Amino acid sequence: MTAPIGGAPEGEDSTRLVRYGDARAREEQRPLYAVWEITLACDLGCKHCGSRAGPARDTELTTAQCLGVVAEMAAMGIREVTLIGGEAYLREDWDQIAAEIVRRGMICGITSGGRGFTAERVQRAVDAGINTISLSIDGLERTHNAQRGTPDSWQSALQAAERVAASPIRLATNSQINRLSLPELPALANLLHDVGSRAWQIQLTVPMGRGADRPGLPLQPWQLLELFPLLAWIKAERLKPRGIDLFPGNNVGYFGPYEAALRYGGANGAHWGGCGAGKWCIGLEADGKIKACPSLPSADWTGGYLAQDDLAHVVATSPELTHLKNRTRADLWGYCASCYYADVCKGGCTWTSQCILGKPGNNPYCIHRALEHEQAGLREVLIHDQPAPGEPFDHGRFRLEVEAAEPPAADATIAGFPLADVIALDWRGGGIWSDAALRATLQRVSRLVTLA
């Protein structure tokens, strides 16, 4: 998911950020942005995939039905639509759907793994009027390939990035942050600049779907104490000087000393304003499910179905889509219920807390919370208790324990590696991490993370 609603920040062209809305739209609290899974078919086998994408759904909407959905979205005031999958381009009519979105006056983008984004498909995207293509790059070659499930996925994504960057379409990139990718973020920032990315969206890996089958892959909450200073350094030293915008996803937060530095628009006073599910955005699945956020578990958060329900009516009246924007501090629990920022934050990212602890309203992935525990000599640890059943958008269960924090290392480290080594890492295979060292890194972490 994207950064929360705010003004068009830091001199960015506001016509490219229509999802942010104006003062009236923010006051009305109505969805401006839709993320639409148009097929579950996928040519990758990502180990963190929340929807367990692969084969297409048996009941995916027809072309005619999809074009009708586009008309419904335009009528209810949606301003921007991102097409996802699975892999959106595996639907043969993907560019027809995109062209209709554009014809109806909405901005259209695509988020893709990029394995099959050939020159022909890039040209089809250009002809459809697509504004932005965001390609997923989740680390350096071995780390990315290990997570994406195919040995050629990293090279394919880079080739796709070069094709998009050479076209009229704006190239963006997105990355999962987890135990594998954390030490490689500075090198990854260099890579994104070299391929021509104009924006980088980052989000924490959440144990949903196949990610729930790998409970050692996500960061521990206390590792935010390493992540946030590193992100602040990357933004100041490697992104901003090169004109690359950083978009922290909605589970990268909240408040504290890094909010102004990392939140998109933070220099102008923008800050986290609570979960935008159902308030600023909606999510649609290929078989017609309507949700307040595309990432939310479908079993608990489906409010209606396209092709049989009126989209605007579902969004306005279904409890599954209205609950989150109407909740208060009274709906929170655990640490979040008593937090200083509770009335504004409302427990952070709903998707993250639901998939970890089984219900929203208490999110341990919070830098303010980690800092507060650190000051008391404590840290929070997630312990995996219950496996996921194996369905799309499913999750298991963790329990949260508070323990004494380990004494800080004598020298600054990131994921156990010296900070100087992390910063010096070069994606081209040079730098201080040799080929053998990269392999050893992957093996080290894979002892904790079953990637097979």
Image (cartoon, helix red, strand yellow):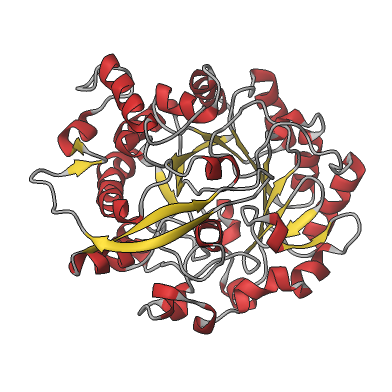
On the image, the x and y values in percent for residue 68 come to 88, 51
User: Residue 358, located in which quarter of the rendered image?
Assistant: bottom right
Q: Where is residue 331 in the image (x, y as percent from the top left)?
A: 54, 79
In the image, residue 383 above or below residue 392 = below
Asked which quadrant contains residue 379, the reply is: bottom left
| Left-right relation of 294 to 307 | left
Q: Which residue is drawn at 58% across and 69% down?
A: 22
Q: In this view, does 37 lie above or below 69?
A: above
Which residue is farthest left? Answer: 410
State the residue at coordinates (14%, 52%): 408
Lateral position of residue 337 relative to residue 19, left or right: left
Residue 110: x and y in percent read 64, 39
Residue in front for this viewpoint, 243 or 304: 304
Residue at (30%, 27%) from the top-left corner? 441
**Total numbered badges shown on the rendered structure:** 0
Q: Quadrant of residue 119?
A: top right
User: Quick check: 114 above or below 27?
Assistant: above
Is residue 257 visible in the rendered structure shown here?
A: no
Residue 103 in percent (x, y) is at 79, 46
Q: Nearer the viewer, residue 276 or 409?
A: 409
Residue at the bottom extreme, as displayed: 330
Tell me, yes or no, if residue 123 can be seen here. Answer: yes
Give the residue displayed 30% in from the left and 58% down from the top: 261
Closer to the camera, 246 or 387?
387
